[in-house]
Image: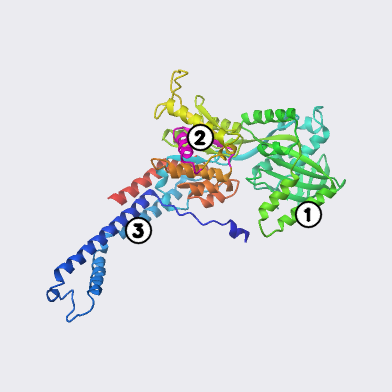
Amino acid sequence: MQIQLNTKSSVHKLSRLEDAANNAVMYIFLVQVALVTTAVICIYILGYNHASNYKYIYFDNYHGSRLYLWLERWIVIFLLLNNLIPISLYVTLEMINVGQSYLISQDLLLYDENMDTPCIVKNSNMCQEIGCVTHIFTDKTGTLTKNEMKFMKFVLNGNVFDVKQDHEFVTNFGNTDVDREQLNNFFMCLALCHAVVIDRDQQLRAESPDEIALLKGLDDMGITFKSRTSDMISFEWKKQLYSYDVMAVNAFDSDRKRMSILVKDQNSGECLLFCKGADSIMMELCSLTTVQKEKADKSIYDLACLGLRTLCIAVKRISSGTAAEWARNWKEATASLENRAEKVAAAGAAMELDMELLGITAIEDRLQDEVPEVLAELSKAGNTLWMLTGDKEETAVNIGRSCNLLENDTKLFYISGALDHKHFVDMVNSAYFDISENFTPGVGYFDHLQPQEKAVEIAIVMDGPSFKYFDEDNHIQRGRLLFLGQNCRSVVACRLTPVQKQQLVGLVKNDAVPKAVTLAIGDGANDVSMIREADVGIGIVGKEGRQAANTADFAIGQFKFLKRLMFVHGRWNYIRQSKAFFC
């Protein structure tokens, strides 16, 4: 039942050439109807009063309705002129599509040895459309980056520690600024609050590579995850085994942006709620003084400027009675047959309040091979590049600079940190009027109030919490935001939900003048909505599963293959189809 409710009908996509062919056939059909109708009228004019002269039309001694004869003649003449409709054109186009799909799938330069994956064509209709793309929407994690996470640093009480260098110092409690209980709870949260399982080969398996990276980092510090069942989880620290009963688990999702687990110590009977998640959510759920919040914000900002992904770690001590009552409410919510997801989320949110912030983790994710070069070539070819990610703004901007989305002299316009709808509109209007006055297409941005040596390119930096104030029904707002996106070299949109990614793709796809051809590329389940929305969807077969690849029109192993797919196969395919259509 749940699977059926979450299943959506597949989206049928047509290339521009196929759409032109359909329109041409429709016009030809209308012309044919007009010719047939004209012929029947002529027969009526010539033979109505002289039926004996047209025995091949009028039967001998026929005294029935003339309407029947005219209808019969109309059908006969229509069949005689049926060759006007080029049915064979569709067969030819489909044969070309099949041939092009074969050539793409057999291209060894699109073969990824690491994943043992060639380029897979799932929608042959889009083979020529990839050569007409004007706007590219890309995810960051797993698409531009390798999705090979490494636990690099963590922060406790404002002190930054390096996992590789400081692990012995920290685990031996050599730092007097770190409370022993806080440190214990911090590492316990990392060891317990996750969805990792151990397979038969003793390998760690999880939906998110972040969780595996954290556990591997803990293992380097002498804390080893040992086992997990539906109601028990254990880890080993300093040769001592710690086991906890699992009372409830609130899984991570794109709306909650956090995960929590309620556990009970098998030895002491103490009940603890551990939680980890994005700082934009966790800061509001933790009890922090002004000084503590400022210190945490500074630490997160410093780590984000290094291009690291951050998570906030928190704990809440709960009495056994309260824990049992909450676990009972959680189990009732999970057993509900109606609005189960909403009830489970509400049960979790009821307990995830007034938590104690323990620390912050920082994970590194390196860029894939040739990403900066490929993005530079795509931009040079006239494509507008959009990076849509759920990461923090500073992290997204830092990655954008390292992969050539943003150059050193690019002028950035920020549409982020909006407090309300009016604030968001003011930021959009400010950027709109500034760019309208100082930007010249094909030349660049030149601030007349601050003369500079040369014109520079511009980029937009936007965040999801501000974009939620975007009014889709306001045509002025839609037009101005689209104007910003179309006149920029690139757009970096951070803190986005999957629905917001889809909205941005739909805005450009439906409103751009002249008509834009959009391409969306991603690797995870949270990218499926924008891949389905775009004219051309490309999925990367990565470490987050094959949801994106299964939904997309094309599946590739690495981002760098996009260059050859567009510049070589896209161009060749469009030329072949055009010759078949017009010649």
Q: Secondary structure at mark 2?
A: strand
Q: Answer few, some or many: residues within 10 Å of disc 2's Cα (few below 14, many 20 plus, some between 14 and 19).
A: many
Would you say residue 233 sits in the magenta stretch?
Answer: no
Rendered image quadrant of residue 212: top right
- Tags 3 and 1 in contact by the CB under 8 Å rule? no
Q: CA distance from mark 1 to mark 2?
A: 46 Å
214 vs 96, left or right, is: right
Residue designated by label 3: 91
Residue designated by label 1: 328
> Looking at the picture, does residue 344 appear above or below residue 392?
below
Q: Residue furthest front?
A: 422
Q: Amino acid at mark 1?
A: Arg
Q: Quadrant of the N terminus?
A: bottom right
Q: Residue furthest bottom?
A: 61
Q: CA distance from mark 3 to mark 1?
A: 62 Å
Q: Amino acid at mark 2?
A: Val
Residue 528: x and y in percent read 54, 48
Q: Amino acid at mark 3?
A: Val
47 vs 10, left or right, is: left
Say which of 543 and 438 sits in front: 438
Tag in front: 3 or 1: 1
Magenta residues span 472-496
Q: Secondary structure at mark 1?
A: helix
What count of labels does the image hold? 3
> Looking at the picture, does residue 532 appear above or below residue 32?
above
Residue 40: x and y in percent read 21, 67
Residue designated by label 2: 491
Marks 1 and 2, the one that precedes in the sequence: 1
103 vs 7, left or right, is: left
Q: CA distance from mark 2 to mark 3?
A: 41 Å
Residue name at image x 47 percent, y 39 percent: 478
